Image: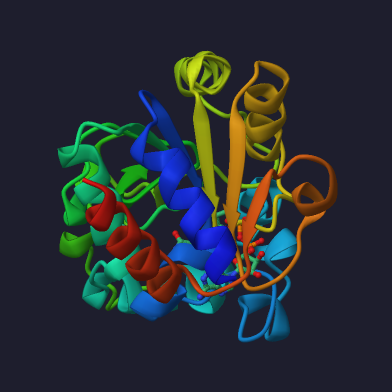
Amino acid sequence: MQDAIKEAAREIAEAKNLVVLSGAGISVESGIPPFRGPGGLWEKIDPMKYANVDYFLKNPAEVWQVLIKDMKEVLDHAQPNDAHLGLARLERLGILTTIITQNVDGLHQKAGNTDVIEFHGTFAWQYCLDCSKRIPTSEVNLSQIPPYCECGGILRPDCVFFGEMIPTQDLYRSQQLSAACDIMLVIGTSALVQPSAHMPVIAKNSGAKIIEINPARTPLSSQISDLIIMGKAAPSMNSLMDEINSLQ
Ligand code: NAD
């Protein structure tokens, strides 16, 4: 792994336009469980069922009770970890331009990154299914499940549920950035959810190097990734940043 970190650091230190694709794994060390893998939500519930828009619209109280209420509790207290902070430092160094994240936790922005495409929306806001009014999640009153807007409509997170489209502008911009980057750093994603998993393929086909950080292999590992750092996000990013600092 040390060789992969040294080589990745050399590549990243010379990059002009590094784009990151992040997934739930980068926030595991902030205490947020991923969907898949050890400790994932999948071990307790089926996210394909509860995070599906049709199921939510038919059973909003159940989905709030089983999935969204607990997510609010976890996300209300989560803080960026060293992997998020390392990426913020890469932006300050003028190397990293944009993060395309599948996460809805807002931790990249909290760490200091300024250009973050929230591919699957954000959990920081809810909106009313009837009048579309937006309300910060931190202000939602959970004494009644599902929570209601003052107009009487049911609130839902401003996230992209399974079965919903990625907002066109986010998808288009992510495709453009993926095609234009010289390195794509892919951190903590199982690369099983489309169309986000296609971004490294676009980057690779456009000539970028793909560097992957993940403790487990993914569908990208054998054919798309040029370098694989097999480790957890925070310690791997710390080692990577130490190497990059020594090259500056
Ligand atoms: P995923 O749950 O499918 O996969 C998680 C990946 O992270 C796995 O490949 C796993 O090996 C890896 N991983 C686990 N621990 C890690 C660690 N410490 N460091 C680095 N990698 C680690 O996640 P996904 O690919 O992002 O796709 C699932 C969907 O889940 C996304 O659409 C996302 O919106 C949603 N989700 C988001 C959050 C969040 O916002 N933090 C949390 C759970 C799920």
For the point 37% across and 32% down, the residue is: 14
User: Quick one: 111 or 63, which is closer to the camera?
Assistant: 111
Determine which quarter of the picture holds residue 203. Answer: top right
The residue at the point 20 percent across, 50 percent down is 89
Rendered residue at 69%/47% (across/down): 54
Image quarter hosting the C terminus: top left
Out of 232 and 73, give the one closest to the viewer: 232
Q: Which colouring convention does the figure follow? A: rainbow
The residue lying toward the viewer, choosing from 167 and 96, is 96
**What residue lies at 67% left-to-right and 52% top-to-bottom?**
52
Q: Position of residue 42 (x, y in %)?
A: 70, 76
From the image, which quarter does the N terminus lie in?
bottom right
Residue 132 image position (x, y, % from top left): 33, 33
Residue 165 lies, with reference to residue 224, above or below; the image says above
Question: To which quarter of the image does residue 76 belong?
Answer: bottom left
In the rendered view, does 172 fall on the left or right side of 234? right
Q: Is residue 34 above or below residue 150?
A: below
Of 158 and 107, the residue lying toward us:
107
Instruction: Determine the quadrant in which ligand 1 lies.
Output: bottom right
Q: Is residue 79 above or below residue 213?
A: below
Q: Is residue 213 above or below residue 223?
A: below
Instruction: Give the mark count.
Output: 0
> Can residue 149 be seen by looking at this rendering?
no
Report x, y in % for residue 172.
53, 14
Q: Is residue 155 left or right of residue 177?
A: left
